[in-house]
Image (cartoon, rainbow, N blue to C red):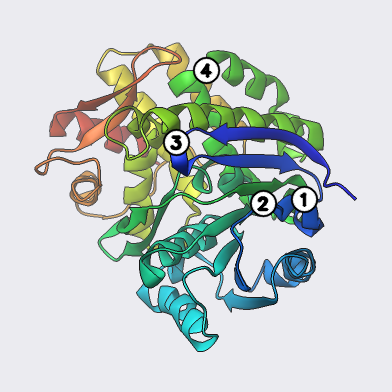
């Protein structure tokens, strides 16, 4: 029985190229995993929320290809994206005598994908891995492009590696079991592709936001496909974020500050990015790059997706100062100068610095009661 594939895209990176497969019921079909590197064993890395739903089906499919299929269940949540949890993956690999041909399968959202990828990049200096993302955010963003890593108390994703998967398998059926909050969080990463690269896609999202929130499978299939197409185009041109790829971080500089300032896991990553896009759009307007109508349009859409549009207060005495301190350890900062992804006209993004006074004014405005 062939797997029910709807779309297949390619991340074009020469010898590191790999397919993104999108469809319904993919993870339970052995054919979905044909053609992967040969190995005697595989390790599925999942979490306590996802494993009870999908690990058994994935194990059954993988047993058609591997003699041993081990399962490691991690604690769920951004708060566990750290060294201690990462070490559990290495423990499982070593305890089971896994060699450098062992294939890792990341079954879960962005946290599982990032940590499994980092473990794969590090174990025996590199073993193959496959992304099987089960959240909307992971399917449209974090599973694609080879960014892996863990958080540090002083900054998000500050420890990691660029390491490409062998395949990304987006099973749309897994989106039906997500909490509504997780769907909204994923929509933040869908929405971002419009302002930075494709205003026609933004028009489509606006017209179908109700269906997306309601998990209409046809709407979700298009959103995942188009998001992956845009990211594939960008990553193929700039794998290691030397320039162009940075535009994919629209909203993330403010968003990462929110996550670090509140404590990882208080707001979901997509919630912080959604609010961060509002703040970045406001800064774009303050710098004369877009008009107020564009900012209002984007803010309305982010709100319609069920995402916060007001920033949290991180410090009762100097809130803007706290945001600035956190943003100065962002990976895009250079010599302590914060560099923002801004909208340089609808459908175009740019990287720019900004005066602290201007950034402070935007933060104060966006975090007002």
Residue under circle 3?
13
Could you tell me which secondary element the residue under label 2 belongs to? loop
- Who's the residue at 80% across and 58% down the image? 28
Q: How dense is the environment of label 3, judged by Cα within 10 Å: few (below 14), some, or many (20 and up)?
A: some
Question: Quadrant location of residue 161?
Answer: bottom left
Residue 139 shows which numbered tag?
none
In x, y percent, where is residue 124? 38, 71
**Front one among 129 and 212:** 129
Q: Are marks 1 and 4 in contact (CB under 8 Å)?
A: no
Viewer-nearest of labels 4 and 3? 3
Query: Where does label 4 land, which residue?
Result: 198
Camera-near label (1 vs 2) is 2
SS of the residue at dot 4?
A: loop
- Marks 2 and 3 close (CB-CB < 8 Å): no
Cα gap from disc 1 to disc 2, whole angstroms: 15 Å
Of labels 2 and 3, the one closer to you: 2
Counting residues from the start of the chain, the first of labels 2 and 3 encountered is 3
| Label 2 sits on residue | 35
Vertical side of 317 occupied by 75: above or below: below
Q: Residue 26's mark?
A: 1
Q: Quadrant of residue 217?
A: top right
| Mark 1 or mark 4: whose residue is earlier in sequence | 1
Looking at the image, residue 186 sits to the left or right of residue 125; the answer is right
Q: Find residue 268 and report its horizontal and vertical position in percent.
A: 51, 54
């Amino acid at each position: 029985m062939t797997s029910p594939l709807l779309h297949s895209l390619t991340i074009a990176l020469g010898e590191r190229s790999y397919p993104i497969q999108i469809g319904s019921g993919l993870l339970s079909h052995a054919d979905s995993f044909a053609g992967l590197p040969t190995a005697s064993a595989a390790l599925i890395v999942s979490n306590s929320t996802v494993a009870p739903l999908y690990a058994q089906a994935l194990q059954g499919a993988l047993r058609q290809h591997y003699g041993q299929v081990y399962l490691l269940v991690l604690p769920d949540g951004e708060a566990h994206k750290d060294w201690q949890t990462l070490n559990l993956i290495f423990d499982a690999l070593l305890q089971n005598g896994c060699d450098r041909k062992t294939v890792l399968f990341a079954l879960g959202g962005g946290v599982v994908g990032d940590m499994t990828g980092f473990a794969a990049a590090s174990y025996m200096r590199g073993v193959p891995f496959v992304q099987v993302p089960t959240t909307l955010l992971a399917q449209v963003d974090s599973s694609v492009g080879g960014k892996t890593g863990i958080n540090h108390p002083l900054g998000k994703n500050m420890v990691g590696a660029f390491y490409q998967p062998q395949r990304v398998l987006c099973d749309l059926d897994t989106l039906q079991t997500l909490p509504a909050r997780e769907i909204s969080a994923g929509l933040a990463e869908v929405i971002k592709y419009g302002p930075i690269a494709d205003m026609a896609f933004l028009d489509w999202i606006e017209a179908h936001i109700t269906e997306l929130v309601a998990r209409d499978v046809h709407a979700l299939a298009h959103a995942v496909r188009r998001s992956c197409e845009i990211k594939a185009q960008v990553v193929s041109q700039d794998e290691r974020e030397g320039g162009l790829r940075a535009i994919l971080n629209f909203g993330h500089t403010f968003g990462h500050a929110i996550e670090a300032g509140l404590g990882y896991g208080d707001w979901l990553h997509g919630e912080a990015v959604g609010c961060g896009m509002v703040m970045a759009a406001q800064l774009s307007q303050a710098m004369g790059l877009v008009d107020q109508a564009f900012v209002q349009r984007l803010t309305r859409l982010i709100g319609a997706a069920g995402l916060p549009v007001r920033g949290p207060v991180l410090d009762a005495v100097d809130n803007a100062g706290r945001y600035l301190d956190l943003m100065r350890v962002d990976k895009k900062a250079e010599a302590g100068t914060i560099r923002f992804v801004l909208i340089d006209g609808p459908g175009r993004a740019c990287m720019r610095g900004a005066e602290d006074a201007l950034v402070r004014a935007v933060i104060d405005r966006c975090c007002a009661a």
